[in-house]
Amino acid sequence: MNIMELKISVVIPSYNPDLKTLAECLKAIQDSNFKPLEVILVDDGSLIDYPEEIRACCKIIKNQKNMGPACARNIGAKQAKGNILFFLDSDVKIANSTFNKIAEKFNNADIVAVQTIYSKLTPVKNFLSQYQNLYQHYNFKGIRQEYLCRLSSYAVAVKKDVFFEVGGFPEFVKNASIEDGLLGMALYSQGYRILLARDIQVEHLAYFDIRKLLSRMFILGRDAIIHSRTGKNKRIELSKTHHRANQIVAILLSPLILVALMTAVLAIGKMFALLFISVFLLINAGFFIFLYKLKGIPFMLKGIIMYYLACLAIFLGFLKGINYSIMKYAPYIKKSLKLFNKHNILPEYITFFVTNKCNASCEHCFYWKELNAPIKELSIDEIEKISRTIGNFSFLILTGGEPFLRDDLAEIVKIFYKKNNLRKMSIMTNGSMPDKVFRVIKDILEECTDLYITLFVSLDEIEDRHDRIRGVEGIYKNASETIMGLKEAQAVYPRLSLGVALVYTSYNQEKIADIYRHIKININPDTINCAFVRGDIKNKLLKTRNIDNFIKLQEMIKSDLIHNDSKGVFYPIIGKIVKACKFESISQLVRIVKEDKYCFPCYAGKINAVIYPNGDVFPCELLNEKMGNLRENDYNFKKIWFSKRSGEIRKIIKKTKCYCTHGCNLLPNIMFNFSFSAKLIKNYLRLVFKI
């Protein structure tokens, strides 16, 4: 990048900063030889007013609440006009030549990020501040590799286009801990180069006391465990980070040393204490000698104690992170009991028709008789009452009609997120309203910070042929715009997955493979589903009995699942299990289509439930057996679900050996059927090893 083309935007996250330190940080930027294009200070919900001397040095963006440093940096980056983002902590002071040297580094077109290092010097004179500064300087200075696989955001420059390409800082990390490391890993996994610039050194002005320092170490350890499996990155190479194998060993030794010291009254305790302490000192001798040469013996001895306490704090953070991860698994363990007992249980999969209004006129719609009929839809207040009686459940599908015709769609999702611990859901849409879809999805994801959404956009054909089957001119163009906009949004919102939903009919059966390939190549969604036309559809001529092409398509989808051409829907913890279940559901769908008979039990009315816009509750979309109406039962879902009428419907489903090709039933029927366990394990291994 030519130095004349380089425009640096400085982004500083700030939360209740020391104003004197911040003023020094800003003055150093003003005194730079190379002037940045702009300085953006993102105040992350601080309780202070900035004096005029600070306001005059930068553009201030104020968050109404504290959202964390990752989010604050991303907000600043979105406002930046430069092509280089320089992220700087408010307690860091750059040198006059910092920006000049960074500009020189970017002359190499292969470089996308430049990592600076802390200087050995800090004006803060207390021991802990001096120690922490030297510790960080030593770690970075000792890296032998030229390029890193992680970065640290205290003072780092990144090309803006690449920054947004990988999604920016991960906002699910709320503390100042590993959010910058994860960004570096995302860059590295995409093959980008992060240059370690040892010659660009900055001063750390932070003041540390014992509580602040150990608290930071504890949070680092905790978050390292919690987010250890975040994303899909290359294997970390310690030689390309500021971490060392000896540091990991020291962390693991720290509790053993403590236990050995506590049992030192015993001979064996003394022996192990001596052994562990000797190993601890030996493997970290390089750092301790470094402290001795710079500061002398007293400083080194205090440094050894501090290093041990920091290791112990990180280890305790590990334990906290492990406990947190176990607690995240606990709900799944509890739900797994439903593999064996399905009596008197609440549903795990709920399909909610939030509206019967629709702006399309699809020829293959099974819900066409109810569309746009004059009914009173459940209000927000009514939905909240229902949510109080429905319990926690695993998965929600919002459909209609066209769900985005409801202006309160985001509020509906928020209710289930807050009241029912909803963390995974899908929304079906015809994609006719791109702007509204973007606005609603953004609102949901920013408010529901650990909710994973798959948005399925319906595409049954290409261009005007899709318009004809949907009965709306230009709907293909709008759907395409919706899809492309969502793909861009995924860079900012990694918890958003994009799916395309196909319906197999006589209208598209001869071209279905070509349609699938077109979608896969030109749109490249995270997942593609193809449903067999079902129910009492509007145009009976669209019913098809040509199953051969449908079966071939499903085999293509299965093949893509194995070979990762289709990424599938990603959820933490159970992502691969869900993918294995989807793989098996496709196999069973093909089997049912071929044999046209009952193949395994249906758990509609047990695991699955359907709620219609007027409050009617059904076991599924296709069985015309109403369980009850929520308005007529005081909005008490349990009252309907455990009623005598609902029990009779479950007996009907079991006695008649009810079956269908509907994917929303097939997936949970397989996931909660213990007899499929062996096949799911086999599928899991096939997906992992791509066999």
Image: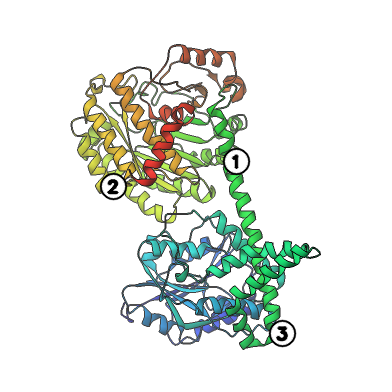
Tell me the kind of residue under disc 1: Ala
- Residue of label 3: 298
Residue 622 or 291: which is nearer the viewer?
291
| Discs 3, 2 touching: Cβ within 8 Å | no
Q: Nearer the viewer, mark 1 or mark 2?
A: 1
Residue 164 in picture, x, y percent from top left? 40, 62
- Mark 1 is surrounded, within 10 Å at the Cα level, by few (under 14), some (14 to 19) or many (20 or more) other residues, namely few
The image quarter in which residue 192 lies = bottom left
Distance of label 3 from label 2 (alpha carbons): 64 Å
Of the 4 image quadrants, the one containing the N terminus is bottom left
- Residue of label 1: 330
Q: Under tag 3, what secondary structure?
A: helix
Horizontal relation, residue 594 to residue 495: left or right: left
- Residue of label 2: 523
Residue 583 in picture, x, y percent from top left? 37, 36
Residue 261 in picture, x, y percent from top left? 75, 66
- Mark 2 is surrounded, within 10 Å at the Cα level, by few (under 14), some (14 to 19) or many (20 or more) other residues, namely some
Tell me the kind of residue under disc 3: Pro
